[in-house]
Image: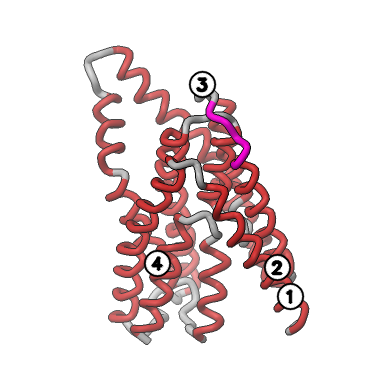
Amino acid sequence: MVWKMLLLGVVQGVSEFLPISSSGHLLLGQVLLKVEGGLTIPIFLHVGTLIAVVVFMSRRIGRLFADMFNREKERRIAGWTLILYLFVASIPAALVGILTKDTIDRVMYGQPLYVAFFFVGTGALLLATRWGRERNQTFGISEALLIGIAQAVAILPGFSRSGLTIATALLLGIASVEAFEFSFLLSIPAIAGAALLEFVELHETGALFGFGSPAALIAGFLASAVVGFAALWIVKKVIVSRKFWLFSFYCFAVGVASLVLLLVFR
């Protein structure tokens, strides 16, 4: 069981931050490896990737807090403005997650063919960034809201949270580094919120400790944290080099393969 959780941790760490949809890959991994543990597994893996992004973004987070309480008025305004934008961008996903999560899960698991098309949709948006151009676009409320809507759409399995948010920012003309930083600062409340919702659901059903291997859970947690940190480094390098669109081919391939497999083995 430990090696299976290690593998799932690697899958979560890679797919949470690379623009390839973690929910679809993690579900597929659990099915193929025949790992049963309900929501306990996603909680531990989500916390691992949460720690990875907090550590990776720690310097940027430190600068943000320094700006918020800086004596210089301009820096203080800039810091609180970014907090406002992150709050606005978090609203759509929070509303969708709280109000429609059960419905989305029921529809997606009942009609898994949708997932294949959503992988292709992610690929199409990533490919579009190849023709996007940095225009020194001023980051404002409207841009934050659009990125937040993209994050809300990514709740659907097959759509990638990082893929949709970063691609939307790039297509809006926002600079690569700024798009990366905003997307992954935004991911912190998103990942924490998802883990919290899963924890509450487990607590309400009384299945909080339903997974019987603490060592396996710890192994998955550590693997998702370490691999997630490495994946963040890769994503940043790719975005800065303006090669983000290359991930589209992987999404197209997974989408087509999923569609074929689901049609053949339905």
Q: Residue at x 56, y 75 (%)?
A: 28
Q: Quadrant of residue 252?
A: bottom right
Q: Distance from label 3 to label 4 (Cα)?
A: 35 Å
Q: Distance from label 4 to label 2 (Cα)?
A: 27 Å
- Crowding around mark 1 (Cα neighbors within 10 Å: few <14, some 14 to 19, many 20+) is some
Instruction: Give the quadrant of the N terminus.
Output: bottom left
Q: Disc 4 on helix, strand or loop? A: helix
Q: Point out the tag, 4 or 1, that comes first from the N-terminus.
A: 4
- Is 132 magenta? The answer is yes
Q: Disc 1 on helix, strand or loop? A: helix
- For the record, the magenta segment spans 130-134
Residue 137 locus on image (x, y percent): 53, 23
Tag in front: 3 or 1: 1
Residue 36 locus on image (x, y percent): 49, 83
- Pointers 4 and 1 in contact (CB under 8 A)? no
Question: Which numbered disc covers residue 256?
Answer: 2
- Crowding around mark 4 (Cα neighbors within 10 Å: few <14, some 14 to 19, many 20+) is many
Q: Residue flagged by tag 2: what amino acid is it?
A: Val
Q: Point out the tag, 2 or 3, that comes first from the N-terminus.
A: 3
Q: Distance from label 3 to label 1 (Cα)?
A: 43 Å
Pointer 1 residue: 260
- Pointers 4 and 2 in contact (CB under 8 A)? no
- Crowding around mark 2 (Cα neighbors within 10 Å: few <14, some 14 to 19, many 20+) is some
Q: Residue flagged by tag 4: what amino acid is it?
A: Leu
Question: Which numbered disc covers residue 138?
Answer: 3
Residue 51 locus on image (x, y percent): 31, 56
Between residues 236 and 130, which one lies in front from this camera angle? Answer: 130
Q: Point out the tag, 4 or 2, that comes first from the N-terminus.
A: 4
Whether 23 is drawn above or below 82: the answer is below
- Pointers 1 and 2 in contact (CB under 8 A)? yes
- Pointers 3 and 1 in contact (CB under 8 A)? no
Tag in front: 3 or 4: 3
